[in-house]
Image (spheres, helix red, strand yellow):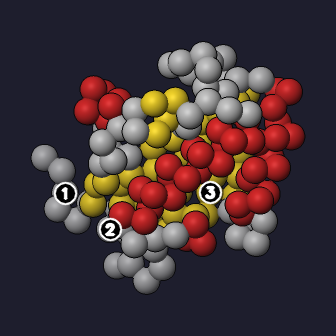
């Protein structure tokens, strides 16, 4: 049984129900973990350039944070998973555009692939609600 002090956000993405996970989980200490986000919007892949996919994926994460009353400014860590090293510059440019003034800790990794080959990037974020118990 889960703790009543842990808040979970579901966004209705098809894989949340199919695989049994929440899009975001807020712990009592104020840490918020957002599951991997891609450029899937309303169950449809919003394929585009690596830059566009990155912007969309971070937008999905931001929407989940918004359900908890948090914003991009509350993000303290990002992780970016890419399928091709050639996309590092575009993904990095998107990250800079979104987070240049926030400066979260960031990691970028090259991975073998995702559940759909048209996806080239997946992101995760961690946020922090200051003043939590």
Look at 17% across and 62% down and name the residue there: 4
Looking at the rendering, in which quadrant would you find the C terminus? bottom left
The Cα–Cα distance between marks 2 and 1, rounded to whole angstroms, is: 9 Å
Judged left or right of residue 14, residue 70 is right
Q: Nearer the viewer, residue 2 or 10?
A: 10
Residue 123 lies, with reference to residue 83, above or below; the image says below
Judged left or right of residue 67, residue 89 is right
Q: Residue 72 in the image: x percent, y percent?
A: 58, 66
Name which of mark 2 and mark 3 comes first in the sequence: 2
Asked whether residue 26 appears in the rendered view, the answer is yes
Q: Which residue is mark 1?
A: 3
Residue 109 lies, with reference to residue 116, above or below; the image says below
Q: In front of the other: label 3 or label 1?
A: 3
Q: Residue 30 in the image: x percent, y percent?
A: 41, 70
Q: In front of the other: label 2 or label 3?
A: 3
Look at 35% across and 30% down and name the residue there: 15
Mark 1 and mark 2 in contact (Cβ < 8 Å)?
yes
Q: Nearer the viewer, residue 90 or 127?
A: 90
Asked whether residue 125 appears in the rendered view, the answer is no
Q: Which residue is mark 3?
A: 77
**Extreme bottom residue here?**
131
């Amino acid at each position: 049984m889960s703790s009543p002090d842990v808040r979970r956000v579901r966004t209705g993405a098809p894989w949340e129900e199919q695989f049994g996970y929440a899009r975001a989980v807020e712990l009592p200490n104020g840490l918020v973990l957002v599951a991997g986000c891609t450029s899937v919007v309303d169950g449809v892949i919003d394929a585009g350039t690596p830059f566009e996919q990155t912007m969309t994926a971070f937008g999905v994460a931001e929407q989940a944070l918004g359900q908890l009353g948090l914003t991009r400014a509350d993000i303290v860590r990002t992780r970016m998973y890419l399928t091709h090293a050639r996309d590092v510059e575009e993904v990095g440019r998107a990250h800079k555009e979104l987070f240049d003034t926030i400066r979260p800790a960031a990691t970028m990794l090259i991975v073998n692939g995702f559940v759909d080959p048209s996806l080239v990037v997946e992101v995760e974020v961690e946020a922090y609600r200051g003043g939590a118990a």
